[in-house]
Image (cartoon, rainbow, N blue to C red):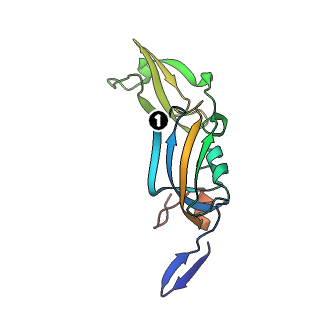
Amino acid sequence: MLQFTFFNQTYVKLMTKIAKNTVVSLDYTLTNDAGDVLDKSENGQFVYLHGSNNIIPGLEAALTDKTLNDEFKVSIEADDAYGQKDDSKKQVVGREMFEPGSPIEVGTQFHAQSPEGDMLVITVTDVAGDEITIDGNHPLAGERLHFDVKVTDIREASEEEVAHGHVHGPDGHHH
């Protein structure tokens, strides 16, 4: 990390372009093809480490080489976002797979672990008596996504952030 000290204060060198191992802060609005707002982040609260697969590939590619205060709109096809819907990620399971007494209804989401150990968001898509249909696709799989973006900050990542593959807060990060 490039730093300098002035009157006992340490400053991080700001980067001029978004590139691998830069920490980027954004304001954005995410919409679907119908124009519905799906997500929004303001006041530079969305922060990620560029080049570490922390965001969808299409948006990361669109951000490469952007500079501070750049504003742009970009549409990302499903293949460069959350992928196409995969029917193999849908299955019918018995109600006994859920905690007794827990309300199970269409739209309920919960976390599960894949056989590879990855955390997944599972969505209930149908309830027919004791048969529950679940879908392991990302809720935005198969959708073209539209971003309206403003770059609000760019800085070089610390060695620790690069080693860990994600941004740390102002007081560091403890695993």
Residue 47 placement (x, y as % from top left): 52, 56
Residue at 54% across, 48% down: 148
Residue 46 placement (x, y as % from top left): 49, 54
Q: Nearer the viewer, residue 163 or 55?
A: 55
The quadrant in which residue 145 appears is top right
Q: Nearer the viewer, residue 109 or 146?
A: 146
Residue that lies at the very extreme toward the bottom in this rendered image: 7
107 sits left or right of 86 in the view: left
Q: Is residue 77 above or below residue 73?
A: above
Numbered disc 1: secondary structure? loop
At label 1, the amino acid type is Asp
Q: Which residue is mark 1?
A: 36
The total of numbered circles placed on residues is 1
Residue 136 placement (x, y as % from top left): 54, 29
Residue at 63% across, 30% down: 84
Classed neighbour count for the residue bearing mark 1: other residues with Cα under 10 Å, few (<14), some (14–19), many (≥20): few
Residue that lies at the very extreme toward the top in this rendered image: 129
Residue at 45% across, 46% down: 40
Residue at 41% across, 28% down: 108
Query: Which quadrant of the rendered structure holds the N terminus?
Result: bottom right
Q: Nearer the viewer, residue 155 or 109?
A: 155
Residue that lies at the very extreme toward the left in this rendered image: 101
79 sits left or right of 11 in the view: right
The quadrant in which residue 98 appears is top left
Q: Nearer the viewer, residue 35 or 88?
A: 35
Residue 66 placement (x, y as % from top left): 64, 59
Q: Is residue 173 above or below residue 9?
A: above
